[in-house]
Image (tube, rainbow, N blue to C red):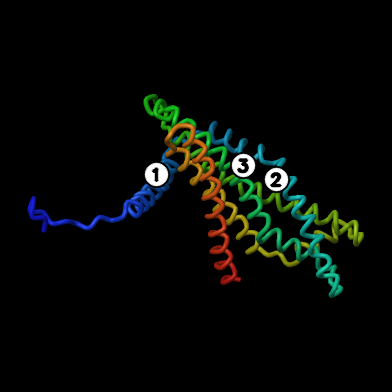
Amino acid sequence: MDSSNGQTDKPVISPKVDAFFISVRNIFSFISRFFREALRPPLETKEFIRQCYMVGYKSLALISLTGFITGLVFTKQSRPSLSEFGATSWLPSLIAIAIVRALAPLVTALICAGKVGSSIGAELGSMKVTEQIDAMEVSAINPFKYLVVTRVMATTVCLPLLMSYTGLVGLLGSYLDVHINEQLSFVAFIQKAFSNINFLDLFSSLFKAMMYGFTIGIVSCYQGYNASQGTQGVGKAANTSVVVSMFLIFIEEVIIVQVVNSIR
């Protein structure tokens, strides 16, 4: 009891702990608002298509190069180990399993987290600190639906498509190396590659890509939409979008792999 004012002193929680729980509350509030706005018509169709173009088409060049090199290098690295056991004929199947189950969704997500995530975080952060979002609220436009919902939906839709493209390009790079060393035909390569791929592998990869796309979109939009402190806040929003997205992608990868393996 404080003798001066007769009030009981209350324990004070650390400001960092308070800030953490406030951030968690704000994040869940942001995600719940996204689902409310996404399910409420109308959809900003033109902006959604434009964001799909920015996320999908603008990433094709980098995705093509990375996917091709991934398949080519992984095949070259796997050949010496299999050749010791005289099992180089297993290369197509091994590469296909690795690409479809893990490499294609993970590589695509990491590339998009660095390219798309930073772009969204910086763009929305710049609009926030220059009060363009506040100006949209004054007008008849819903800034959350126009800026956030369209971008999150675009990343969620485009990531599975980009992942499928990455897998095909990666298999093409693998086939090039196998054809040069073993003179295997393309038809025989495809038959061997997909002999051990089942529906669960394809479904889990598509599901992972959708989760990764949603994670990249929601994290980047949250960081940009809540940016502050001027131009320094814009850079922080872009950097945090990439770091947090990649961290969550790895966490999701571990969880989904454990669930799929338990089903398998």
Indicate whether 197 appears above or below 111.
Answer: below
Q: Label 2 sits on what residue type? A: Ile
Q: Nearer the viewer, mark 1 or mark 3?
A: 3
Q: Which residue is mark 2?
A: 63
- Which residue position holds label 3? 115
- For badge 1, the amino acid type reads Arg
State the separation of the CA atoms marked 2 and 1. 32 Å
Percent x, y of residue 21: 35, 53
User: Is 1 left or right of 121, judged from the image as shown?
Assistant: left
Does 193 sit left or right of 130 as displayed? right
Instruction: Looking at this view, name the residue that lies furthest to the front.
Output: 4
In the rendered view of the protein, which quadrant contains the C terminus? bottom right
**Image point 77% across, 50% down: which residue?**
68
- Give coordinates of residue 159: x percent, y percent: 61, 47
In the picture provided, is 65 more to the left or to the right than 143?
A: right
Q: What residue is shown with label 1?
A: 33
Which one is earlier in the sequence, the residue at label 3 or at label 2? 2
Q: Nearer the viewer, residue 137 or 117?
A: 117
- Specify which label sits upstream in the sequence, 2 or 1: 1
Q: Mark 3 vs mark 2: give the one in front.
A: 3
Q: CA distance from mark 3 to mark 2?
A: 11 Å
